């Protein structure tokens, strides 16, 4: 899926600690088949191997002329995960051993990992020619993100504030998307979280869109468990951005990039589906994002009145599923420790930094944890290990510098820490104080893979009547096409009790269209409903 050749700014030593990344297993993280793990590396029950400290692709560049010819293919197919700063950088070339492993991984079907588009046979011929020392015909340039302007939902000042908080990003395609005028941005004020009240009769039992924070007051007593005690959101796991349920200084901004075709943006297609349940009509808006759409969320930390970015999560729509990735300044504890030492050579003279570095370098700090969703009949369950909360750095200026100057790199399949067979996949935020993650932020159980994200996202739009019999009139969990944060409805028409109020808001009318099979082919659009 994307291109620079700079080294991650977080670790400026000649040979920075490598990112822990799975490789060499079917369905695993992007990597190269046949890697031999260094002594002492851990293997998960699924067979994935973790590389603790040894960057690969360090030999002399192989067949530079041949690589130049296939560079667009590597940018499109590989560099989402294999860009500068990751353990295996494939953007600027490869040594002879890596070239052989790249071809073997593609030939085996392991790379790129599903649901990403496999390498076409003709393109594999070119990549093989590079491996074999010849120069193939040059591949066409990689497709660029659209620059067709969209109507923004945010006012110019707010949008500028959010964009000013964006970090440097190692994946060039994402970096371009974040700055493109085609990219739509929103927050919870611009698109207030809402669900669909899908069951009614259009008279005394209304259809319509309802704000999430109105649900608890409307639903029958048996269904109140589906909402938080304060009634502001759904219960776990549908209430908040994953990992932020207990955080008080996390702030989320969402974005979307639609694919361009024929000089226009491919729109989101919606259709109105009807059925019956217990003799009552169902009227549901279902929509499909076109193949090639990227939807993302920016996890920011409130720093007084300012915002700094902690993580960028992205999902890309393929034929009938979504690929997942996340970009962080420090996918591993070891890279963060190295960055602190580089930024603060005298770190050992500061007790708080000594404590923080010691915690980052202590792999024995993992503890078991399980999360499930009792309110929703445990539709979503996660079990594994989390790290101890990060100690307070005691140096807010350093934390800001780390977040603002470090290049964010892909964390797909990456372990924050590994201890034997135990893996934590992200940091745990401190109780208080400014840190590289929001306070009480909990990423340890959230491995950046499709299987993790789909546990929750695949339940968006789930019919509440299948969970609580008495709540049959309620409708659906919020979210359509496995995306929670977006809906096309006019916010001013969403209320707690009125009848049918679902209309496409004016600001989205150019990119949200009524489904037409002739205009919205099945090769680009597919409609999803969660199975009970």
Image (cartoon, rainbow, N blue to C red):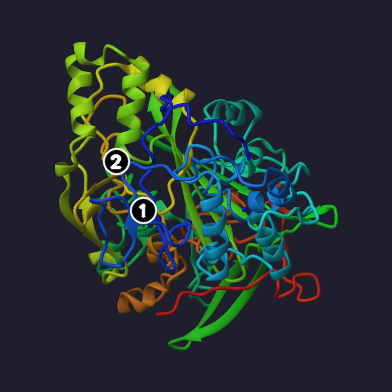
Mark 2 residue crowding within 10 angstroms, few (<14) / some (14–19) / many (20+): many
One can see residue 224 in this view: yes
One can see residue 437 in this view: no
- Going from N to C along the chain, the mark reached first, 1 or 2, is 1
Of the numbered discs in the image, which one, if any, rests on residue 305? none
Which image quadrant is residue 519 in?
bottom right
Q: CA distance from mark 1 to mark 2?
A: 21 Å
**Quadrant that contains the C terminus:** bottom left
The furthest residue to the bottom: 279
Q: Whole-percent x and y of residue 333? A: 30, 37
Dot 1 lies on which element?
Answer: loop
The furthest residue to the right: 262
User: In percent of the image, x 64 and y 44: which residue is there?
Assistant: 173
Q: Nearer the viewer, mark 1 or mark 2?
A: 2
Mark 1 residue crowding within 10 angstroms, few (<14) / some (14–19) / many (20+): some
Residue closest to the eye, 34 or 166: 34
Mark 2 highlights which residue?
A: 427
Residue 336 located left or right of residue 106 = left
Q: Whole-percent x and y of residue 191? A: 55, 47
Residue 402 located left or right of residue 66 = left
**Residue 378, above or below 489:** below
Residue closest to the eye, 114 or 315: 114
User: In percent of the image, x 39 and y 50: which residue is there?
Assistant: 21
Q: Whole-percent x and y of residue 452? A: 38, 61
Residue 389 located left or right of residue 288 = left
Of the numbered discs in the image, which one, if any, rests on residue 239? 1
Which image quadrant is residue 360 in?
top left
Which image quadrant is residue 15 in?
top left
The furthest residue to the front: 133
């Amino acid at each position: 899926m994307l291109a620079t050749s700079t080294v991650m700014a977080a670790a400026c030593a000649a040979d920075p600690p490598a990112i822990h990344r799975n490789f060499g297993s079917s369905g695993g993280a992007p990597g190269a088949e046949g890697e031999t793990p260094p002594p002492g590396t851990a293997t998960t029950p699924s067979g994935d191997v973790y590389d603790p400290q040894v960057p690969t692709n360090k030999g002399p560049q192989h067949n530079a002329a041949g690589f130049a010819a296939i560079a667009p293919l590597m940018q499109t197919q590989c560099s989402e995960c294999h860009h500068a700063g990751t353990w295996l950088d494939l953007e600027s070339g490869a040594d002879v051993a890596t070239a052989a492993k790249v071809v073997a991984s593609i030939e085996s079907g392991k790379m790129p990992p599903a649901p990403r588009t496999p390498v076409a046979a003709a393109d594999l011929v070119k990549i093989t020619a590079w491996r074999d020392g010849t120069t193939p015909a040059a591949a066409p340039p990689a497709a660029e993100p659209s620059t067709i302007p969209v109507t923004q939902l945010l006012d110019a000042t707010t949008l500028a504030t959010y964009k000013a908080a964006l970090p440097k990003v190692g994946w060039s395609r994402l970096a371009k998307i974040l700055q493109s005028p085609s990219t739509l941005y929103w927050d919870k004020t611009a698109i207030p979280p809402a669900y669909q009240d899908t069951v009614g009769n259009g008279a005394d039992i209304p259809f319509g869109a309802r704000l999430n924070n109105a649900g608890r007051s409307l639903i029958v007593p048996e269904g109140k468990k589906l909402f938080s005690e304060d009634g502001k959101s759904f219960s776990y796991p549908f209430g908040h951005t994953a990992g932020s349920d207990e955080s008080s200084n996390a702030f989320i901004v969402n974005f979307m990039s639609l694919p361009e075709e024929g000089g226009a943006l491919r729109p989101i297609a919606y259709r109105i589906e009807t059925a019956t349940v217990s003799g009552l009509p169902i009227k549901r808006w279902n929509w499909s994002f076109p193949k090639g759409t990227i939807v993302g969320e920016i996890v920011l930390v409130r720093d007084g009145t300012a915002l700094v970015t902690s993580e960028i999560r992205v999902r890309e729509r393929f034929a009938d599923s979504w690929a997942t990735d996340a970009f962080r300044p420090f996918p591993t504890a070891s890279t963060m420790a190295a960055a602190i030492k580089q930024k603060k050579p005298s770190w050992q003279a500061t007790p708080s930094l000594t404590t923080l570095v010691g915690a980052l370098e202590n792999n024995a700090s993992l503890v078991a944890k399980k999360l499930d969703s009792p309110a929703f009949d445990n539709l979503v369950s996660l079990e594994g290990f989390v790290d101890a909360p990060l100690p307070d750095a005691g140096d807010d200026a350093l934390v800001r510098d780390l977040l603002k100057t470090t290049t964010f790199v892909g964390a797909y399949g990456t372990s924050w820490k590994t201890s034997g067979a135990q893996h934590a996949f992200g940091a745990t935020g401190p109780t208080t104080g400014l840190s590289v993650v929001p306070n009480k932020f909990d990423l340890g159980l959230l491995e950046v893979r499709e299987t993790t994200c789909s546990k929750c996202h695949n339940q968006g739009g789930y019919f509440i009547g299948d969970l609580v019999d008495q709540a049959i009139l309620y409708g659906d969990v919020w979210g359509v096409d496995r995306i929670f944060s977006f809906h096309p409805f006019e916010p001013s028409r969403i209320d707690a009790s009125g009848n049918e109020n679902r209309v496409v808001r004016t600001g989205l009318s150019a990119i949200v269209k009524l489904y037409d099979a002739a205009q919205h082919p099945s090769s680009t659009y597919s409609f999803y409903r969660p199975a009970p």
